[in-house]
Image (cartoon, helix red, strand yellow):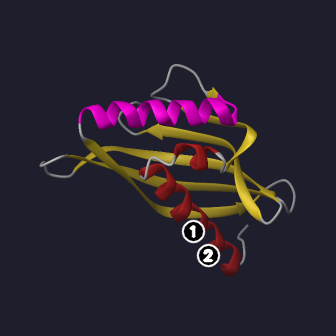
């Protein structure tokens, strides 16, 4: 089942905004794009991160580590699919995400290739991530 072109474009804009928040180290604002009880699960992590505050803290810690080694990361999303969820205020999305890493003075390199699967829920006039599952291709 598909969604309207207008909704698809809205979700593309949402992800562009969300990933740019993360890439700019605006981790508290980025965490606000998750529900209060949101989950960030990744096969590269020992356990899922649960709750907006914990998601913000984990992202901030990662940015501090990257700053120490003068590395900048950019998230590039593509091949997005958007499907209706269990009700009109829920969507299921799936996309590929490349994380491009560049050390100060260095060449850009692909840090990893991933599959990102989200459950989005409408909260007011925006969307938020209820559950995100990120699977790195090299770990599967």
Q: Which residue is mark 1?
A: 12
Task: Using the image as rendered, state which of residue 78 and residue 33 is in the foreground.
Answer: 33
Q: Which residue is mark 2?
A: 9
Decide: is 117 above or below 47.
Answer: below
Q: Is residue 81 left or right of residue 21?
A: right
Question: Which of the image's four quarters has the N terminus?
Answer: bottom right
Q: Where does the image place residue 21, in percent across and percent down from the top left?
A: 51, 54
Q: Is residue 135 left or right of residue 101?
A: right
Q: Where does the image place residue 126, in percent across and percent down from the top left?
A: 74, 63
**Residue at point 68% right, 37% down?**
52
For mark 1, give the secondary structure: helix
| Secondary structure mainly formed by the magenta segment | helix
**Residue at point 68% right, 80% down?**
6
Task: Using the image as rendered, state which of residue 112 and residue 17 is in the foreground.
Answer: 17
Q: Disc 2 vs disc 1: Cβ atoms closer than 8 Å? A: yes
The single residue placed furthest to the right in the displayed view is: 87
Q: Where does the image place residue 124, in percent across and percent down from the top left?
A: 83, 61
Disc 2 to disc 1, C-alpha distance: 5 Å
Q: Where does the image place residue 47, in percent across and percent down from the top left?
A: 57, 21
The single residue placed furthest to the top in the displayed view is: 46
How packed is label 1: few (under 14 Cα within 10 Å), some, or many (20 or more)? some
Is 135 covered by the magenta stretch?
no
Q: Is residue 38 left or right of residue 64?
A: right
- Residue range highlighted in magenta: 50-69
How packed is label 2: few (under 14 Cα within 10 Å), some, or many (20 or more)? few
Task: Using the image as rendered, state which of residue 54 and residue 47 is in the foreground.
Answer: 54
Q: Is residue 73 left or right of residue 88?
A: left
Is 56 covered by the magenta stretch?
yes
Question: Which of the image's four quarters has the C terminus?
Answer: top left
**Residue at point 61% right, 75% down?**
9
For mark 2, give the secondary structure: helix
| The label number, if any, that marks residue 35 in the structure image | none
């Amino acid at each position: 089942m598909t969604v309207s072109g207008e909704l698809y474009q809205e979700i593309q804009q949402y992800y562009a905004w969300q990933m740019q928040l993360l890439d700019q180290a605006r981790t508290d604002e980025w965490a606000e794009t998750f529900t209060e009880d949101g989950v960030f699960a990744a096969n590269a992590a020992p356990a899922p991160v649960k709750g907006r505050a914990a998601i913000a803290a984990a992202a901030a810690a990662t940015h501090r580590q990257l700053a120490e080694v003068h590395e900048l990361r950019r998230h590039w999303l593509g091949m997005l699919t958007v499907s209706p969820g269990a009700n009109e205020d829920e969507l299921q999305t799936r996309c590929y995400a490349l994380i491009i890493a560049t050390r100060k003075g260095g060449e850009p390199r692909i840090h990893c290739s991933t599959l990102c699967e989200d459950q989005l829920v409408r909260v007011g006039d925006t969307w938020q991530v209820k559950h995100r599952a990120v699977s790195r291709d090299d770990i599967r």
